[in-house]
């Protein structure tokens, strides 16, 4: 069984278990009672193996990890189970498992995993505390006992627990101590939460415990608490994702059935777009969890960075999604009798405990390694492989190899160009990549590509962006190539693919027309079959770098008697054919980036038809999927974020908390963009068609790039209105160039508004 199947098995098992009882009914019944959960149900949870997930096999546990715990937690969030799985099932278990082995520790692990003992971790003393520093609780060792003094806040569980793992200082050093409930000197105050669960405050006044109840001292104690808190935050994030997903499911069903003004409210465009944005946040949260846990398993990030990334994204997504759900339910959503409010309350509670969104964004920022200047020696790689087992190559070695290749072969004067380069300027770099066999990193090897796995593809993109390598005219690589691989005949593949790879054919895209931009089905450029040739008449516009192309792939109307999507075909055209005129268009930045292309009785061989006649719409949708995948590449955001970081460091902006808060948010946005991109890249790698949900990626990528670009312009102060490059401590930055490029990104391949419409109908299933 694969790891993914195993995780799904845990998720299915948890959903089945939770579905045996009405968890929402139980939550309502228990929210006014103490401790707010049922011991008998907790025992069933233990028997189901949930409490043994993090316990090593040698200690009688399942020996699994945070992925499995997160799968359970997501289902807990969907159902709103009252029992404190994160606090007593993850946080306290993780603390015990990280503590040094001892007789007491081993007994506690066994008892907690079996459900006989319910334990809580009592570490926090201050409001908003993220780390176990500045602890005032004291442990004083005497001849035969230890006395615990001090106060702890926000403990889960409080009432209902059989004892607590208490973090206190002993002779100036941190320590962990097992303090059973009910001992003299313990005072517990229960604090009800808005979702019906509870946090507790504990006060210890000379509480005597045996010397053997010391579980850990010094760094071991601090490490155990740090790990336990971050494990809990990861599980929290997954629970928040479950909360958000279920709340949106309930809301979408309501939007399909609630009628106002004679129509389902789900047909109103404004509400559709808001629902799409909330759904996009849940998809980002899902990608974030998967990517952060993968990076953690591979040892690429510390657990603190992974936990803060997950908590920040998932808390933001869940609170915004559940709040919107109440709004979309109208007055009924504001009543206690409707379940949707319970999800909002659970999201608020989870988002606030163990650190909120802003705090974890800041922590994630602070935990990022400081970027060192990459110095690559040409001797590092004497030769560069055309082909290799890229999957098996360590990522650090792969990145070093790509950096070395860039340093050796990329033209230095073309680094960090602020505008799109023309073929004459960048063709030598295209040829260098082609000779190396690296021009098509995502293509299958059978067709001359590198077939990089998603993590290496992301690394390949990132290293090009960090080095400042310009993008050559590559519509043949990123658009036409995948189309021919999927839809082309063997003869077409053999004829065109090698010439795309070599650069002999430079391709332009002929989709948009003056009155058929995002509404491609309205195109009018016509191709009439005349014997073995098509005669093409009409116009295409917004053809990127069309003046550099010598070939064009285009959509043409081949039947006007059927519905407009049904009468479209996909055609390949040699732009040297008589009757074709190309006219450049200047973009908002003044560059000749686009073109109009006119066709006047242009004769095209029938053999240039890709797919079947009048079935080009299916190909068009597939190509738009590839284009949206490309438009969703994180490279633009990563490059602009690097420029922003350079500018901010030069201006001392990282000393400004307000700037850091905004920068950290965008840093996380870019990280989760990469995660979502990798998800869709994996679909392409498997040879599967891209789903309509790829529009989530296109929206998030282009709008994230725009947000980063705007902050770059704002952070540049007076240079934010300047033309050309500005210098900041020796670094040359084209401040407004990313923003000018970002403006186009939200328009091409279907505007963001069109994408939201597609998602509302095809992914969320809302009525038209």
Image: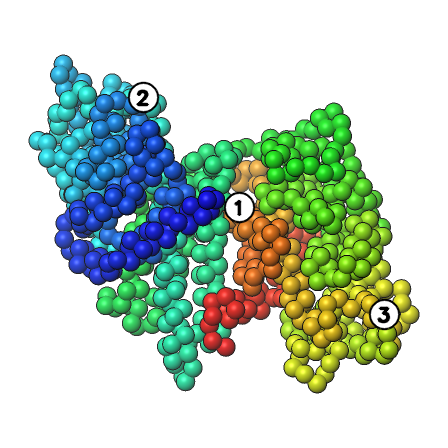
Mark 1, other Cα within 10 Å: few <14 / some 14–19 / many ≥20 = many
Tell me the number on the disc at residue 605.
3
User: Residues under labels 3 and 2: Cα distance?
Assistant: 79 Å
The residue identified by callout 2 is 218
- Residue farthest to the front, as pictured: 1
Please name the colour scheme applied to the rendered image. rainbow
Image point 13% across, 16% down: which residue? 144
Q: Where does the image place residue 410, in percent across and percent down from the top left? A: 77, 39
Q: Nearer the viewer, residue 739 or 494?
A: 494
Q: Where does the image place residue 185, in percent across and percent down from the top left? A: 10, 31
Q: Nearer the viewer, residue 435 or 611?
A: 611
Mark 3, other Cα within 10 Å: few <14 / some 14–19 / many ≥20 = some
Relative placement, left or right, of 362 versus 685 is: left
Classify mark 2: helix, strand or loop: loop
Q: Which of 504 and 165 is in front in this view?
A: 504
User: Residues under labels 2 and 1: Cα distance?
Assistant: 34 Å
The residue identified by callout 1 is 671
Q: In which quarter of the image is residue 90?
A: top left
Which of disc 1 and disc 2 is earlier in sequence?
2
Classify mark 1: helix, strand or loop: helix
Q: Is any part of residue 236 visible from this angle?
A: yes
> Above or below — where is 278 with respect to 52?
below
């Amino acid at each position: 069984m694969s790891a993914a199947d195993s995780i799904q098995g845990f998720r299915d098992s948890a959903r089945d278990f939770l579905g045996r009882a009405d968890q929402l009914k139980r939550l309502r019944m228990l929210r006014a009672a103490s401790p707010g959960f049922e011991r008998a149900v907790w025992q069933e949870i233990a028997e189901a193996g949930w409490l043994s997930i993090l316990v090593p096999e040698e200690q009688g546990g399942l020996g699994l990890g945070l992925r499995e715990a997160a799968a359970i937690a997501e289902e807990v969030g969907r159902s709103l189970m009252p029992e404190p799985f994160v606090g007593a099932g993850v946080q306290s278990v993780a603390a015990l498992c990280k503590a040094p082995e001892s007789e007491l520790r081993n007994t506690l692990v066994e008892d907690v995993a079996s459900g006989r003992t319910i334990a809580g971790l009592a570490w926090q003393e201050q409001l908003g505390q993220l780390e176990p520093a500045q602890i005032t609780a004291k442990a004083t060792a005497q001849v035969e006992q230890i006395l615990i003094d001090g106060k702890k806040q926000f403990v889960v569980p409080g009432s209902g627990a059989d004892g607590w793992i208490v973090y206190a200082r002993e002779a100036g050093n941190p320590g962990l101590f097992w303090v059973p409930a009910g001992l003299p000197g313990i005072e517990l105050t229960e604090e009800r939460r808005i979702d019906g669960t509870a946090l507790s405050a504990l006060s210890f006044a000379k509480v005597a415990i045996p010397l053997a109840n010391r579980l850990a001292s010094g760094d071991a104690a601090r490490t155990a608490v740090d790990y336990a808190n971050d494990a809990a935050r990861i599980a929290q994030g997954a629970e928040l994702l479950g909360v958000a997903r279920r709340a949106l499911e309930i809301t979408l069903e309501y939007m399909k059935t609630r009628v106002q003004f004679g129509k389902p409210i789900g047909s109103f465009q404004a509400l559709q777009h808001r629902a799409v944005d909330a759904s996009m946040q849940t998809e980002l949260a899902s990608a974030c969890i998967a990517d952060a846990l993968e990076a953690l398993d591979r040892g690429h990030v510390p657990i603190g960075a992974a936990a803060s990334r997950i908590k920040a994204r998932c808390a933001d997504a869940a609170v915004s999604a559940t709040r919107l759900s109440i709004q979309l339910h109208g007055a009924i959503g504001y009543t206690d009798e409707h379940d949707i409010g319970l999800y909002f309350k659970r999201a608020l509670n989870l988002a606030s405990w163990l650190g909120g969104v802003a705090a974890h964004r800041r922590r994630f920022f602070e935990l990022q390694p400081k970027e060192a200047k990459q110095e690559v020696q040409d001797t590092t790689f004497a030769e560069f492989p055309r082909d290799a087992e890229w999957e098996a190559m360590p990522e650090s070695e792969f990145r070093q190899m790509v950096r070395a290749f860039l340093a050796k072969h990329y033209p230095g004067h073309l680094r960090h160009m602020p505008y799109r380069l023309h073929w004459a300027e960048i063709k030598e770099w295209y040829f260098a990549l082609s000779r190396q066999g690296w021009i098509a990193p995502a293509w299958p090897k059978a067709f001359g590509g590198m077939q990089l796995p998603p993590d290496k593809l992301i690394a390949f993109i990132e290293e090009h962006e960090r080095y400042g390598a310009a993008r050559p005219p590559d519509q043949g690589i990123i658009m036409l190539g995948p189309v021919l691989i999927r839809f082309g005949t063997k003869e077409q593949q053999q004829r065109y693919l090698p010439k795309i790879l070599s650069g002999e054919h430079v391709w332009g895209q002929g989709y948009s027309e003056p009155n058929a931009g995002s509404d491609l089905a309205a195109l009018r450029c016509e191709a009439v079959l005349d014997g073995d040739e098509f005669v093409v008449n009409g116009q295409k516009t917004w053809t990127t770098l069309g003046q550099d192309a010598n070939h064009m792939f285009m959509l043409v109307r081949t039947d006007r008697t059927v519905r407009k999507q049904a009468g479209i075909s996909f055609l390949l055209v040699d732009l040297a054919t008589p009757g074709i005129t190309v006219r450049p268009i200047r973009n908002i930045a003044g560059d000749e980036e686009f073109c109009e292309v006119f066709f006047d009785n242009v004769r095209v061989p029938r053999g240039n038809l890709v797919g079947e006649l009048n079935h080009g719409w299916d190909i068009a949708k597939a190509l738009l999927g590839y284009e949206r995948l490309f438009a969703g590449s994180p490279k633009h955001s990563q490059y602009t974020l690097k420029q922003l970081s350079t500018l901010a460091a030069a201006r001392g902006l990282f000393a400004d908390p307000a700037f850091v808060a905004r920068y950290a948010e965008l840093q996380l946005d870019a990280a989760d963009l990469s995660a979502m991109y990798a998800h869709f890249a994996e679909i392409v790698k498997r040879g599967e068609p891209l789903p309509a949900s790829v529009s989530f990626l296109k929206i998030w990528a282009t709008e994230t790039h725009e947000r980063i670009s705007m902050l770059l312009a704002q952070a540049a102060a007076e240079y934010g209105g300047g033309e050309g490059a500005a210098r900041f401590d020796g670094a040359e930055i084209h401040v407004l160039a990313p923003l000018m490029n970002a403006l186009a990104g939200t328009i091409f391949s279907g505007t963001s508004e069109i994408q939201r419409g597609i998602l509302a109908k095809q992914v969320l299933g809302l009525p038209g």
